[in-house]
Image (cartoon, rainbow, N blue to C red):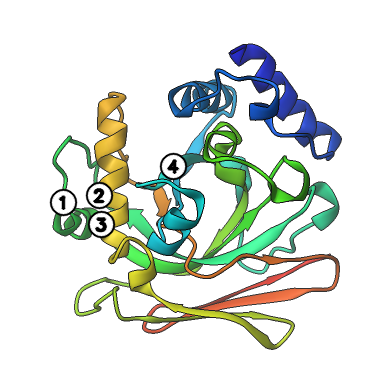
Amino acid sequence: MNTADAVARLTKAVADRTAIGRLTDEYTGLDLPAAYDVQRELRSAAGELAGWKLGLTSRAKQAQVGVAEPVYGFLPAAGALDLGEVLETGRQIQPRCEPEIVFTLGRDLGGAHVTAAEVLGACSGVAVGIEVLDSRYRDYSFTTADVVADNTSASRFVVGAPVSPQGIDLRLVGVVLEKNGVVAGTASGAASLGHPAAAVAWLVRCLSAEGLSLRAGQVVLSGGLTAAVPVGPGDVVVASIDRLGSVELACR
């Protein structure tokens, strides 16, 4: 397994806006630990971090791809879109959008035994968000190790105004994703590991094993709640979550 070569291939795919074949087709040694090594090298070159993201948080999705736990990636600060900012799809390879429950951290949080309750206590607010995925692999065809190495297909993201989580059962909030005025997907907050705060707690425990923690001011995308929808110029995507509000993303 050549970590530097894998990093170079993924970086070039982003720069060229051209999808590549799966790394696991070429590197037999690309297992999950090696894939996270690739991701760490990408992270070290990414500059300031806005926070972190989770993937494969749906139990059904885990069963589909044959894994027993989620995966995680990082969010470069440069990937943040402001409210009302347009997504330039020509700068992506094959963009797709999905709705997220986003946690904003009010204080640092770390440790090997963090619970969902501690996550809720540490967050300054929760918000509705849209993540723009952009896999660097052709046709979104990848193994779990491939997608981890590719930073879980992270690209851009937009986050709405946070609200207090007090009095909101995030398991039960309804989620609607619309594309061009048509409902593209529905879900509840429980689609993310039974409770989105449990997904964030899992992330904190994983980061603790690396000697890392969540930092005050960072955001965490707690996992896609519906299937991601492809987008192109002229499309408008709206994510709405009960009690949290709505976020709209226009594309060109």
- Compared with residue 132, is residue 84 higher up or lower down, i.e. above or below? below
Residues at circles 3 and 2 in contact by the CB criterion of under 8 Å: yes
Give the SS element for disc 4.
strand
- Measure the alpha-carbon separation of dots 4 and 3: 14 Å
Q: Is residue 186 left or right of residue 3?
A: left
Q: Which mark is residue 20?
A: none
Which residue is under mark 3?
198
- Measure the alpha-carbon separation of dots 2 and 1: 5 Å
Crowdedness near tag 1: few (<14), some (14–19) or many (≥20) residues, C-alpha within 10 Å? some
Which residue is more in the foreground, 61 or 236? 61
- Residue type at mark 4? Tyr
Q: Nearer the N terminus, badge 4 or badge 3?
A: 4
Q: Report the number of discs.
A: 4
Which residue is under mark 1?
115
- Residue type at mark 3? Ala
Crowdedness near tag 4: few (<14), some (14–19) or many (≥20) residues, C-alpha within 10 Å? many
Which residue is under mark 4?
72
Q: Nearer the N terminus, badge 3 or badge 1?
A: 1
- Measure the alpha-carbon separation of dots 2 and 4: 12 Å
- Measure the alpha-carbon separation of dots 1 and 4: 17 Å
Residues at circles 2 and 1 in contact by the CB criterion of under 8 Å: yes
